[in-house]
């Protein structure tokens, strides 16, 4: 999966939550792990052929923007995201993934050619890397500010792929063909 956004111009600014209880951005997804590669064994092996059902919330976000000649990217990041897992794998996901991955980033890249626009949710530390990337972003996500820069809004991205990499144990878990629902707070972000 291609890495989202090549930085030519990078602007960083601080966003802020509304100070209340509603997060600025909530990303939810549910998918089945269908691909297991590497030498392992890994504590994540128990997720093979199982369904992962999660929600990640980002509040009081930091904002990063960059652009190329044809695409503009909005990155929202937090040092500690709200994380919730549901279903039969909730304990494994909570203990083996969420306990390690606390900082998260949501990237929306809008391109002049809408077919090239993407969305990703990612987190990584030395021993564990995770990225959920979607190759199809609906037209409803093409929201821009007065300067033409992307603004995060509510939408459902599709044609998504997941990679969960246990670096320590050389185990790579994957899934494809699922959706991710992005819901913003009371207004677009930022």
Image: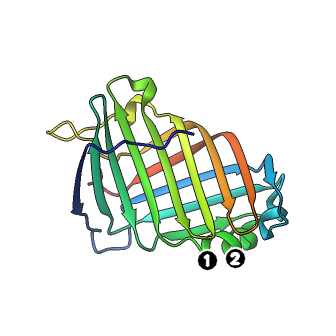
Query: Horizontal and vertical percent for residue 55?
Result: 56, 61
For residue 77, what is the image quadrant? bottom left
What is the image's colouring?
rainbow
Which residue does the image show at 20% across and 36% down from the upper left? 148
Identify the element where label 1 is drawn. loop
Q: Is residue 181 left or right of residue 4?
A: right
Asked if the residue under mark 1 is in contact with the one under mark 2, i.e. CB atoms within 8 Å, the reply is yes
Quadrant position of the N terminus in the picture: top right
Q: Which residue is mark 1?
A: 99
Check disc 1: other Cα within 10 Å, few if <14, some if 14-19, many if 20+: few
Residue closer to the observer: 90 or 148: 148
Q: Which residue is mark 2?
A: 95
Residue closer to the observer: 115 or 40: 40
Query: Horizontal and vertical percent for residue 36?
Result: 80, 51
The dot on residue 7 is none
Is the residue 137 above or below the residue 63 in the image? above
Query: Horizontal and vertical percent for residue 38?
Result: 79, 54
Query: Horizontal and vertical percent for residue 95?
Result: 69, 76
Which residue does the image show at 83% across and 63% down from the upper left? 40
CA gap, disc 2 to disc 1?
5 Å
Is residue 176 in view? yes
Residue closer to the observer: 171 or 185: 171
Check disc 2: other Cα within 10 Å, few if <14, some if 14-19, many if 20+: few
């Amino acid at each position: 999966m291609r890495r989202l956004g090549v930085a030519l111009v990078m602007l960083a600014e601080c966003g802020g939550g509304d100070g209340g209880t509603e997060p600025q951005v909530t990303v939810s997804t549910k998918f089945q792990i269908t691909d297991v590669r590497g030498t392992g064994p890994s504590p994540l092996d128990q997720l093979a052929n199982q369904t992962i059902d999660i929600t990640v919330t980002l509040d009081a976000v930091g904002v990063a923007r960059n652009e190329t000649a044809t695409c503009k990217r909005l990155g929202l990041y937090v040092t500690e995201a709200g994380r919730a897992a549901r279903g039969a794998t909730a304990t494994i996901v909570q203990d083996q993934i969420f306990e390690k991955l606390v900082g998260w980033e949501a990237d929306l890249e809008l391109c002049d050619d809408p077919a090239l626009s993407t969305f990703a949710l990612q987190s990584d530390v030395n021993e564990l890397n995770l990225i959920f990337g979607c190759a199809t972003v609906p037209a409803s996500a093409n929201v821009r500010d007065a300067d033409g820069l992307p603004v995060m809004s509510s939408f459902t991205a599709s044609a998504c792929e997941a990679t969960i990499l246990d670096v320590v144990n050389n185990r790579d878990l994957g899934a494809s063909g699922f959706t991710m629902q992005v819901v913003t707070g009371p207004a677009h972000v930022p």
